[in-house]
Image (cartoon, rainbow, N blue to C red):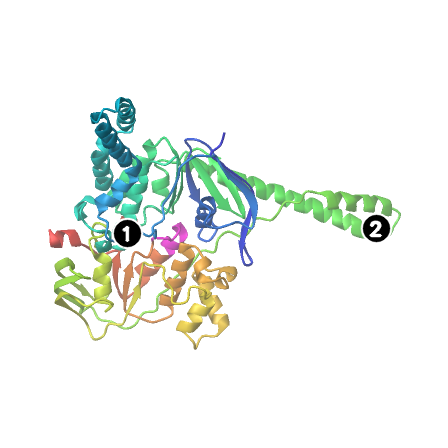
Amino acid sequence: MSLLEIEGLSHSFGDHVLYKNAGFTLNKGEHVGIVGANGTGKSTFIKICTGQIIPDSGRLVWQPDIAIGYLDQYAEIRPDLTMKEFLQSAFSKLYEMEERITQLYEKAAEGDDRSLGLAARYQEELEACDFYSIDTAIERVINGLGLSAIGLDRQIAEMSGGQRAKVILAKLLLEKPDVLLLDEPTNFLDKEHVEWLAEYLSALENAFLVVSHDYGFLAKFVNRICDIDNHTITKYYGTYSEFLRKKAFLREDYIRQYAAQQREIKKTEEFIRRNIAGRKSKMARGRQKQLDRMDKMEALEQKEIIPHFRFSGLPLTNTEHLLVKQLAVGYHYPVLSDIEFSVKGGQKVVITGFNGIGKSTLLKTLIGQLPPMRGDFKFSDQVTFLYFEQDLTWKEPGWTPIQIVSDAYPHMIIKDIRKQLAQCGISSKHAMQPINTLSGGEQAKVKICLLTLSPCNFLILDEPTNHLDFHAKEALKAALFSFEGTVLLVSHEEAFYQDWAQRVINIEKQIG
């Protein structure tokens, strides 16, 4: 029996159709990668599977009594818990069993012989569940995800957003549910930790669904692909590279069949038009009935809009644009100290370092969102900077992209706003949807669109590729390469910046 069965799934946001009478089945042990362009409904599909979103129509049935684990990076956690306490909660039932054993032994010491036998059975169950290897299991996962550096005694309240997301993922992996549902699990992971997670998932016997735009990551462990495209969900068996070949072949075959059917329809309609009132009217009416009964193929929607980003530059010289000296940054206490570097005009600089080290905190300090805790930094007087924040937060989550751009640039007419959004890969339908109903990738494109509308000579970008698909990443890469101004980028994707970055600053080496 399958673990999950979906039939007749249809769902829309306003006029934007995601799925139309789609179906999907998840079987035991299947490792499924969910792929599709930004805005096709990958994250929505996961939320439908978890019950967070109720579809317009369709039947969704999970096998009874199976444990489902969902990676919710924004889940509420008691802030006073330490990382160790939070991760140990993955084994709460086993700890409760251990406590029960202690109580049973106490009863046995008082002369209750039955308690001894029950305690022995519980003891066997603990050993079967590797209870006495819990610390080893926790150590393995936190090392793999790069959490050991911050310490098991660190409280959740003291963690960055990226660290917190990794701790939630760590607990989910330790729980080992029957089915894992992971939406962009690599967003907050560095290269070596992405490699570790791929190996971990590859060795997992349980089934899982993973949404990811990192196709190299998916290629390492999936044995099925769930492709969301053209309002339908198609399941392909095999690796990611096999999926690409099969999809290309099936698409070409469908296009040929559709074209042949369209020629036949046109030919039949022409016959009916010429003969409906003549001697062959009976034959023409018969052809019309055949045409009405025909199972007409739908035209494939035009492929995703390929974005094109272009940042407007301002004059600059190659003199020093930014000088950072003995800088310490943080919230209640410094997370980075004694940071020193300088950036010249027109230079393309990338800041790297393990996740949670304080890269985002550094950028927020440089743009003035946070005060420096010690030290100093100074921008050149000629600098006009723009900032891309990685968090997808909006002043008015219910506003559409058109409203958001219009609010930021009230002098722009609606026609020009639509044109600019379209150039950045936002379809006309998405442009009129509330921003909080769009995918992470679509929201990121809107944020980039806002940056393209103001001239600047210094771009400060914090993980701009987290939610972008391949085409959007390539467009952003080209835009940054051609931008004549200065770029200061925080990124964990070496493949994104290695072709155009002139300098890489590893923050770990500055504090080590």
| Distance between the alpha carbons at the discs numbered 1 and 2 | 75 Å
x and y, in percent, of residue 102 in the image: 22, 31
Residue type, mark 1 in image:
Arg
x and y, in percent, of residue 108 in the image: 23, 25
Q: Which residues are magenta?
A: 466-475
Residue type, mark 2 in image:
Ile
Q: Nearer the viewer, residue 118 or 462?
A: 118
At 33% from the left and 71% from the top, the residue drawn is 455
Q: Secondary structure at mark 1?
A: loop
Q: Is residue 324 visible?
A: yes
Mark closer to the observer (1, 2): 1
x and y, in percent, of residue 453 in the image: 38, 70
x and y, in percent, of residue 173 in the image: 31, 39
Outermost residue toward the bottom in this view: 411
- Residue at label 1? 78
At 40% from the left and 51% from the top, the residue drawn is 469
Query: Relative to 233, is 130 on the left or the right?
Result: left
Whichever of labels 1 and 2 marks the residue nearer the N terminus, that label is: 1
Outermost residue toward the front in this view: 111
Q: Is residue 198 visible?
A: no
Magenta-drawn stretch contains 169: no
Q: Nearer the viewer, residue 1 or 183?
A: 1
Query: Relative to 222, is 142 on the left or the right?
Result: left
Q: Secondary structure at mark 2?
A: loop
- Residue at label 2? 276
Query: Relative to 376, is 23 on the left or the right?
Result: right
At 60% from the left and 49% from the top, the residue drawn is 299
